[in-house]
């Protein structure tokens, strides 16, 4: 059971570079999310999607973009990386908020911007 | 806006009982859930309350009072492996625009 798979696990970026964090899930979940977690802090919602072709901003969307062309994939794009984007990024998915609010998380991607 | 507030740290003794509180302000509230996260790991689901009352799952119980915008996670017979961060999370919005927001987390430290 793969669940939620995100890549890469670790990445170092230089200021101004761009990159895409990949996320795929094999549970046929409609809802997908990207969160970031700074050291010792909680999870902040960056973007979320309620289905293919539909995305919306979360709490901290600035500096990021997403797309949802298929049910399975929800990549997160960082444009012009800044040190403030150094964080751990978690992709997650769920069946629906009404169905118990169970979110399944990927293992996380550790990103450092220098 | 929406927010979920919880204490930043709690310390307890092995074998004891500990309660982690969560107060929230969200519109279109769906229910309250709880997640556990060990250092370096991903959050994992513990419990969910859609309705008022107590939900029990083994050593863990969760409670919700919608009228008080309040919930808690109760951990019994604490074990050293329960040392972790615990997050409450709330679903906000309506069926076509729902998002799940997390509290800032409570770090639980357990002493032998």
Image: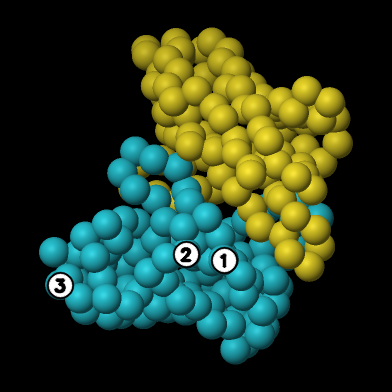
Identify the subunit bearing mark 1: A
Q: As drawn, is A113 to the left or to the right of A57?
A: left
Residue ID at (82%, 41%): B50
Q: Which residue in the structure is indicated by mark 2? A: A61
Q: Quadrant of the C terminus of chain A?
A: bottom left
Identify the subunit bearing mark 3: A
Q: Residues within 10 Å of mark 3 (few under 14, many from 20)?
A: few
Residue ID at (70%, 49%): B91
Q: Quadrant of residue A88?
A: bottom left
Secondary structure of the residue carrying numbered label 2: loop
Residue ID at (74%, 28%): B69
Q: Residue furthest front?
A: B1
Secondary structure of the residue carrying numbered label 3: loop
x and y, in percent, of residue A16 in the image? 20, 76
Q: Residue furthest bottom?
A: A69
Q: Quadrant of residue B71?
A: top right
Tell me the shade of chain A: cyan
**Alpha carbon separation for disc pair 3 and 2:** 20 Å
Q: As drawn, is B48 to the left or to the right of B100?
A: right
Q: Which residue in the structure is indicated by mark 1? A: A57
Q: Mark 1 and mark 2 in contact (Cβ < 8 Å)?
A: yes
Labels 1 and 3 positioned on one and the same chain: yes
Identify the subunit bearing mark 2: A
Secondary structure of the residue carrying numbered label 1: strand
x and y, in percent, of residue B46 in the image? 63, 40
Look at the picture and state if A71 lies above or below B111. below
Q: Quadrant of the N terminus of chain A?
A: bottom right
**Alpha carbon separation for disc pair 2 and 1:** 6 Å
Q: Which residue in the structure is indicated by mark 3? A: A14
Q: Which chain is yellow?
A: B
């Amino acid at each position: 059971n793969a669940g939620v798979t995100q890549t890469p696990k670790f990445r170092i970026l230089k200021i101004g570079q761009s990159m895409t964090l990949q996320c795929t899930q094999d549970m046929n979940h409609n809802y997908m999310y990207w969160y970031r977690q700074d050291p010792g802090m909680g999870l902040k919602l960056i973007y979320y999607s309620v289905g293919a072709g539909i995305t919306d901003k979360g709490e901290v969307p600035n500096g990021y973009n997403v797309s949802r062309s298929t049910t399975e994939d929800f990549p997160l794009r960082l444009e012009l990386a800044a040190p403030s984007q150094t964080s751990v990024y978690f992709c997650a998915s769920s069946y629906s908020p009404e169905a118990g609010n169970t979110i399944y998380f990927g293992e996380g991607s550790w990103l450092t911007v220098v | 806006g929406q927010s979920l507030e919880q204490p930043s740290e709690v310390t307890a003794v092995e074998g004891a009982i500990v309660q982690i509180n969560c107060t929230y302000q969200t519109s279109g509230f769906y229910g309250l859930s709880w997640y556990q996260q060990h250092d370096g790991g991903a959050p994992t689901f513990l419990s969910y309350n859609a309705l008022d009352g107590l939900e029990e799952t083994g050593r863990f119980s969760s409670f919700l009072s919608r009228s008080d915008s309040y919930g808690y996670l109760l951990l019994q017979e604490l074990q050293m492996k329960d040392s972790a961060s615990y997050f409450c999370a709330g679903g906000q919005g309506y069926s076509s625009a729902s998002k799940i927001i997390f509290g800032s987390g409570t770090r639980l430290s357990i002493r032998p």
